[in-house]
Amino acid sequence: MVLTKRIIPCIDVDLDEEGNPAVYTGVHFEDLRYTGDPVEMAREYNEAGADEFVFLDITASADGRETMLGVVEDVADEVFIPLTVGGGIRTVEDIGETLRAGADKVSITTGALERPELITDGARAFGSQCIVISVDAKRRFDEDGEHYVAVDGESCWFECTKKGGREGTGIDVLEWAREAERRGAGELFVNSIDRDGTKDGYDLPLTSAVCDAVDTPVIASSGCGGPEDMYEVFTEAGADAGLAASIFHFGEFSIRETKEFLDRRGVPVRR
């Protein structure tokens, strides 16, 4: 049986100046601009044929606040595809509350890096299928890493960051990916800070290195400029799913166009 590749739109949600939830799009996790209403966008993507949907509360961890569960409930009412929610999840109780609000999976970054036992405890309590470990990776060209790959003719390692990419950790991404898998993570959500919002294509060396290091399904994120980039990350890096934001948010490509492009090139997708 051939597994289909998943096409996943993602919304980055923050509070606007009036305290209302809003979707923002940025570059390198910065220079955010207003994009739309999270509930309306969730409804549109559900109708557009997305395979899954990701809701990220992008400042919950950095601000030390809880995820916007009320908004999650409203979004969950609009989508009938798997919903992953991330941001501010630090405890098993947080995981439970997020799932009860309507999420099918939770995406955890900072909380897992600061207390890896959260992965183990969450997988035991709710099942590995619910636990997605999000990796916000940044390229490093120094001698502090453990595993190196060739990038543009140079030797590079990838560092895990936390709090929305604001803080480095010194942790090698490949070592962390293996530990997350051992602890029971059901998926790895691999973001490239260097490619975020650039539309220059996914970070293929990063994605390929993670896919080679683990057996856990890998969702490639950051840098998608169009269907060709998804084709490359599936066929060259081995990703199981491709996540994109701005190309879908601003109508540059539709979910349907992307799937048709991939289907014509022999990539199995759900139609």
Image (cartoon, grey):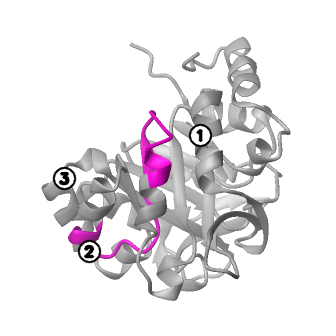
Q: CA distance from mark 2 to mark 3?
A: 13 Å
Disc number lying in front (3 or 1): 1
Instruction: Name the quarter where the C terminus is drawn.
Output: top right
Q: Horizontal and vertical percent for residue 170?
A: 50, 83
Q: Residue at x 52, y 50 (%)?
A: 54
Please determine whether, in this image, residue 211 is positioned above or below residue 270.
below
Report the front residue among 176 and 15.
15
Q: Horizontal and vertical percent for residue 30?
A: 75, 75
Q: Residue at x 27, y 55 (%)?
A: 100
Which is nearer the N-term, disc 3 or disc 1? 1
Return the residue at label 2.
91
- As for residue 83 lying within the magenta part, the answer is yes
Residue 157 seen in the figure: no
Residue 4 seen in the figure: yes
Q: CA distance from mark 3 to mark 1?
A: 27 Å
Which is nearer the N-term, disc 1 or disc 2? 1
Please determine whether, in this image, residue 49 is positioned above or below residue 229.
above
Report the front residue among 248 and 197.
248
Magenta highlight range? 74-94
Badge 1 element:
helix
Return the residue at label 1.
43
- Mark 2 belongs to which amino acid? Thr
Q: Horizontal and vertical percent for residue 102?
A: 35, 50
- Answer left or right for 121 relative to 249: left
- Mark 3 belongs to which amino acid? Phe
Return the residue at label 3.
126
Q: Which numbered tag is attached to residue 26?
A: none
Q: Residues within 10 Å of mark 2 (few under 14, many from 20)?
A: some
Q: Horizontal and vertical percent for residue 188?
A: 43, 52
Please determine whether, in this image, residue 225 is positioned above or below residue 96.
above
Which is nearer the N-term, disc 2 or disc 3? 2
